[in-house]
Amino acid sequence: MLDRDTRIAILKLLREGHGIRTVARWVGVSRNSVKAVQHSGEAEVPVDRASKLDPHLDRIRALHVSCEGNEVRVHEELAAAGIEVGYATLTAFCRAHGIGEQPKEPAGRYDFDPGVEMQHDTSPHKVRVGGRVLALVCASLILCFSRKLYAQVYPRWSRLEARLFLSEAIAWMGGAASRCMLDNSTVIIGRGTGKDAVPAPEMAAFADRYGFTFVAHEVGDADRSGKVERPFDYIDHNFYAGRTFADLADLNAQLRDWCERDLHRPRRRLRAKPVELFAAEAHLLRPLPRYVPEIYDLHSRKVDVEGYVNLHTNRYSVEARHIGHRLEVREGGDRVQIFDGHRRVQEHAKLPYGAHLRSTLPEHRGQRHRARSAQPTEQERLLQAQGEELAELVRRLRRHHGGRAVTAVRRLHRMWTEYPIEALRGAVSVALEFGLLDLDRVERLVLQRIAGDFFRLPRNEEDEDDG
């Protein structure tokens, strides 16, 4: 529909005697539009014509409520009542009268004084690293006044990674702001949401050490942390593009350098560079603590029969003398330390999470096999003292089965306790002569030798015929 100024121009040109075709070309409208204005002779924009649905406004409002906002169902109910209109007409009518429309509020803006607030958040990214596309978590921290940004990526995100990242980011910033705004992530928030959110105990202790408080915005109010939300798209489309990464360490090193260069990039809205604004903010940040204890997660693990402790599907070796003992495992960012009480017994480089790998230190290789061969079990020593035949069978079982010979030795020991020693020696002598190590066959040989003395066995048909 033509506006008032266009209609005035058309009427003025027509009064000057110009033709309809010429007026339409000059004004940039169709000839029919010019004819309609000429026919009405009025510059005022005509009021919209009445809609067929105007008499049914209250009914449509009620149907919209009963149909739970589904306008397709509203259209069907109107058709069933004999009110035939197009679906597009119905939706336009609803929009015009605000039916089903949420009132929009004007967006505000947040102004931050120096050193008052920093914002933290994470975002999932898919990055090609070492020739493979990995699903990673990008974590970032930004000072709201100066827009100084720090970001790193992690293969997983837990409270350990959160503490490691925030500790590294705050040290890179040179201090912390008074509060840290974040969403309602359960990694940091222990319970509650928004103003009722309470950080997890270890995260609250972390914030106390650096002199700031965690604050969560209300659910759905993502604009409250908009300063940290926008850089994720910038990292995704500016940093990753055209770069290659050998591994995660290389990726994070390049990302750290990128953050350094980003400090000197001018901001159009700020009309300054972050490095210039940070000069006015740095002295207002909470100073770094003089001492920061090592950040780690504490686990209790029992050493398995092979001399390893298990952590996140990976296995870390310890000395064989700790087999069966429960030790304390401290998981840090890049290393795993194993303690027996207050004494550190081992330290390993941390393996990738969920990699199903094994870390064996050089001094632990083969120690369990040597210990087994040098220290025979009590059952082995007892059998070896019962004669040359049993001692030789034990040696052959150990050589044949290796570390799994314990089961066979236990069975041979049971046979020694249950059967006469002479019958057992004779059966073992025959087995060694023919190279038999199958204890089932050895036991059958023993039973054949003692059948007439200790058991009353049923005779077969041939024995009955001979009798």
Image (cartoon, rainbow, N blue to C red):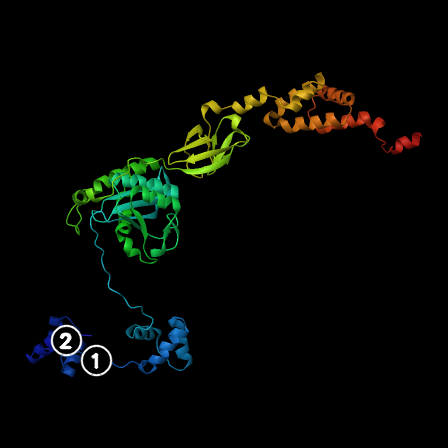
| Label 1 Cα neighbours within 10 Å, binned few <14 / some 14-19 / many ≥20 | few
Amino acid type, mark 1? Val
Q: Earlier in the sequence, mark 1 or mark 2?
A: 2
Q: Position of residue 216 (x, y in %)?
A: 33, 53
Secondary element under disc 2, as helix, strand or loop, is helix
Image coordinates of residue 212 in percent, x first then y, are 29, 46
Labelled disc at residue 47: 1
Tally of numbered discs: 2
| Residue 208: % across, % down | 32, 44
Q: Is residue 156 visible?
A: no
Which secondary structure, mark 1?
A: loop
Is 359 left or right of 96, judged from the image as shown?
right
Q: Is residue 397 left or right of residue 360?
A: right
On the image, numbered disc 2 is attached to which residue? 4
Image side of residue 74 versus residue 458, left or right: left
Which residue, as the protein is rendered here, is positioned at the far right? 467
Answer with the quarter of the image where residue 420 lies. Answer: top right
Q: Please give the name of the residue rendered at 31% of the width and 35% of the height, measured from the top-left corner.
A: 291
Q: Is residue 110 above or below residue 465?
A: below
Quarter of the figure that contains the C terminus: top right
What is the three-letter code of the residue carrying label 2?
Arg
Vertical arrangement, residue 27 with respect to residue 314, above or below: below
The answer to whether one can see residue 369 in this image is: yes
**Vertically, is 77 above or below 196?**
below
Q: Nearer the viewer, residue 97 or 5?
A: 97
Residue 80 image point, x, y percent: 42, 80
Q: What's the distance in space between the residues labelled 1 and 2, CA to CA?
A: 12 Å
Lateral position of residue 248 relative to residue 263, left or right:
right
